[in-house]
Image: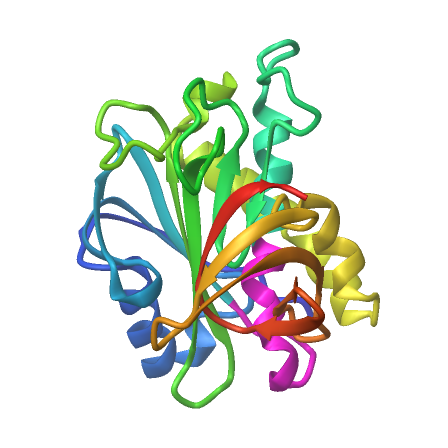
Amino acid sequence: MHVQPRWEILDEVGSTSTELLVRAAADPDAWPDRSVLLARRQVSGRGRAGRAWTTDAHHALTFSILLRPAVPTDRWSWLPLLAGVAVVQALHEFQPDGAAPPHEVACGLKWPNDVVHLGGTEVLPEWGCLRKVGGLLAEILPDRSGVVVGIGINLDGDELPVPWAGSVAELGVRTTPEGLARAIHSRLSDPIAAWEAGEDPTSIVAPACLTLGTHVRVTLPGDEVIEGEAVDLATDGALRVRAGSEERVVHAGDVAHVRPA
């Protein structure tokens, strides 16, 4: 029997993901698959590698989705990328005709968990014309019964923290935080269902992944640096990089887009 997901909107929270992890662990039945916790203001958000993020509803969307996928846990590493595909599809849905930057793809994913657009007017070191408009972070529940995927999107450019940050307003997207969250939530159904049905997740994610086919510099944990072409995604969603005569599989690291391959 299908159980309707729960939607809860808070005025302020430290971190939507932390709050949802706590609530789902304390009362699992109250938080079924695809449940959402959205905050109008987030004061202690977390990004990859523990980076902090503070937002409010005037400038950003911050929400978390609880997923209880019907696949083995060793395949859950795909979830941030699959959720990223839903974000990209939702953003395309909101773009008015002619609003996209003059590039083949208006927005996409920068591996492993950034949502970017291609409309930067200045070429920046390690980013080129890419501008980060959002990010995703997945965390597994303590009892491993599900995954919380936190999603943050810059709605406008009023409070961008770094030169390579961007906003969906630059894509012509004009919507409310809840409207965009509901569009992402709706778009998530197809990639998750296809993945659960056994479709190769690479075929779902690769068309949206702008990192593939580019020359990258990857700083690995421990500060080892490798440079080469991002050629494909591995069976667990890791990035395959051809560096000289060898191929490396990258599971974690900061990826800089040096130039097109």
Q: Which residue is drawn at 39% across and 32% down?
A: 124
Quarter of the image where one finds residue 250: bottom right
Q: Magenta segment, which residues?
A: 67-83
Magenta stretch: residue 81 in it?
yes
**Residue at far top of view:** 98
Residue 199 located left or right of residue 83: right
Residue 199 located left or right of residue 132: right
Quarter of the image where one finds residue 74: bottom right
* In-front residue for pair 63/35: 63
Q: Position of residue 169 (x, y in %)?
A: 42, 21
Q: Position of residue 228 (x, y in %)?
A: 61, 58
Magenta stretch: residue 237 in it?
no
Determine if residue 174 is in view. Answer: no
**Residue at far bottom of view:** 143
State whether the magenta stretch is mostly helix, strand or loop.
Answer: helix
152 over 237 or under it: above or below = above
Q: Which residue is drawn at 36% across and 81% down?
A: 25
Q: In which quarter of the image is the C terminus?
A: top right
Quarter of the image where one finds residue 30: bottom left
40 over 131 or under it: above or below = below
